[in-house]
Structure formats: structure tokens, C-alpha cells
Image (cartoon, rainbow, N blue to C red):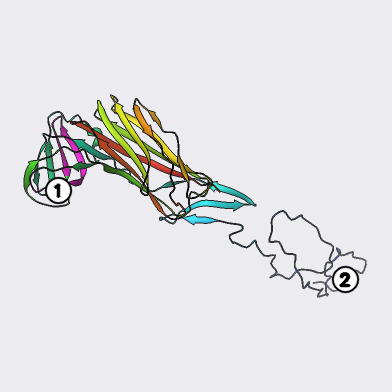
Amino acid sequence: MVTSVNADYNAPKGAATIGSSGTPADTVVTETSYGQSSSAGISDLFSRGDHTHGTPAVNSASIFQKYNDANEFIGFADVNGVRLRIPFELAASATPRLICNWNSATYSQTLTTVTVTQTGHLMSARLNGANVYLTVSTGNLTNGWYTNFTYVDANTFTCTSTVSQSTSGNLAANTAQITMAQHLIPAGAIGASGHVRLFFSITTSGLTSAVLDFYLANTNFWTNSITTTSTHGSYLAGFSNQNNEAIQSSMTISFSGGLGLTTEAKPKGTVDTSVSQVLTVKATLATAGNYIAVWPNRAEIHPGD
């Protein structure tokens, strides 16, 4: 128990001595901007226990942020006053899509299982699980996508229909342009000078002649004719905004794994990416007896100011 105070005791400057209530300050130093210098201070006053210095305001001047459909952060962020560009991937199905151009295939369906017979179809179990597009000539099957491609043997595979029925018939040649992959680009996510990269793999029957088309909204950015003897390869394509969210230029396309590019058209685009747009990959088979499968690996947006 303290009964007295030594008068010779030298308390630190500004410290309240025992028995003294001291004097609280009525002001506080604002600390709501970056780059402020440190200081020990000179005031004899003390701070109240519930004081605060504040924090920088969150507004369009300090943080520009966007979120995708999965509520994941995308776009730009300011850290210590430095604006960062944050690349992000677009959500897409990892399931490959497969189209075939046959003129002698037959099918039969029991319940939801469709069995397709085509002598020497050239496909393998590598494609198991793919969605396959069937074009129908006769019977009650309808044109469209069927799930769960399953290799049976060199002449047969099965797939699954959403409709349960018993029917049989012939398949037709398929030379139509078919959508193989789509990616939703969020409004304003690219920015005025950002770019988009599209990566995917291709599996073919070999000796394939195909055309790949890339669309942003209704603008065809690339038309690529491919003639190849390779059965597998990878593909990179993309486009960039030209210091304007509504002016685009397609980027150089590259292949690996033996895929051959015979012709290429790369027009410029005038699509307004300040609003949401859809990037679409379509394929067309020109040669009977061929197939092509597209595996949409990923699409990336690299934002720019």
C-alpha cells in the first residue's frame, strides 16, 4: 500500500503522477492517407482509451473491384496506393465436347442409353465422359448433345439421352457449325487495355479437315482452317482491347502437338466489353468419317486500365 509520494521522483514528461487525474486531449491526429511520417509527439496531454485515428475511405478513388458470378474477387485493387491488375479465370465446363461427321452410322436406344455403331469410328476410351453431338437422319432421336460418351469397341460407343424411349435409326452427316465452348466475360472486367487468353486441347481422328471459329458476341474474331494428321494438340488464342473497351484486336494463335493451321483470318472487333459479353468457340467438320473433340482447359482475363 502506497502511503506517500517521493517529491524527488521525476515522472516522464506528460505522465500523470499518483493522485493526479491528468488532462485528456480533445484532438486526435488523422491517419487516413498513405505515406504519413512517424512522430513521438510533444504534447503533455494523454489519449483517451477509446480514441481512434480513422482509416482510409473505401471509394472509387482507392479501390475498383468487381466480382464474378461465383462472388469471387476479380479486376483491380489498390495496395498502398499502387494499382494491381489481378488476372482471373472464367468458369467453364471441363467436360470435352465431341462432334462427328458420319454418313453410315446407326443407333438404337433403350431407356436412356443410346448405342451408336460406326465401323472404324477411330475414337478411344480417352474420350469417355465427353458430351457428343448426334445428327439424326431417321428414327425418334433428336439432333443435339448427349452426355457420357463411353467407348465400347472400335465400332461402337454409347451415350446418354435425357429422354427415356425405345427407338432406332440412322445418323446423318454433320457439316454444321457447332458450339464447342462458351465463356461469360463480366461487364468491364477486361478494362480499356486488358486482354483475354483462351487455352484448350483438341483431339481428332487424324487426317482431319476442320474449321474453328471464335466469336465475341456476334463478331467473328478468328476463322481458322485446320488440316492435320495429329490426333492431339493444344491451342492458344485471344484478343485485347485497344485502349478502348469497344475496340479489339485478335492475338496471335499458336498450336502445339502437331496441329496444322492452313488459313487464318483475324478481323478487328468493335464489341462493347463494358457490358457482359459471351466468348464462343465453334467447330465445323468438312471431311466425312472424321471427328473432333474440344477440351476447354481455361480462359483467362488479364485486366488493363
> Can residue 297 be found in the magenta stretch?
no
**Of residues 231 and 245, which is closer to you in this image?**
245
Residue corresponding to mark 2: 5
Q: Earlier in the sequence, mark 1 or mark 2?
A: 2
Give the residue displayed 27% in from the left and 33% down from the top: 210
Give the residue displayed 43% in from the left and 45% down from the top: 269
Residue 78: x and y in percent read: 60, 52
| Mark pair 1, 2: CA separation | 99 Å
Label 1: state its secondary structure: loop
Q: From what the image shows, is residue 51 above or below residue 257?
A: below
Q: Quadrant of residue 283?
A: top left
What label does residue 184 carry, if any?
A: none
**Of residues 241 and 301, which is closer to you in this image?**
241
The part of the chain drawn in magenta is 138-159
Residue 14 relative to residue 167: left or right: right
Residue corresponding to mark 1: 142
Viewer-side label of 1, 2: 1
Give the residue displayed 44% in from the left and 34% down from the top: 252
Label 2: state its secondary structure: loop
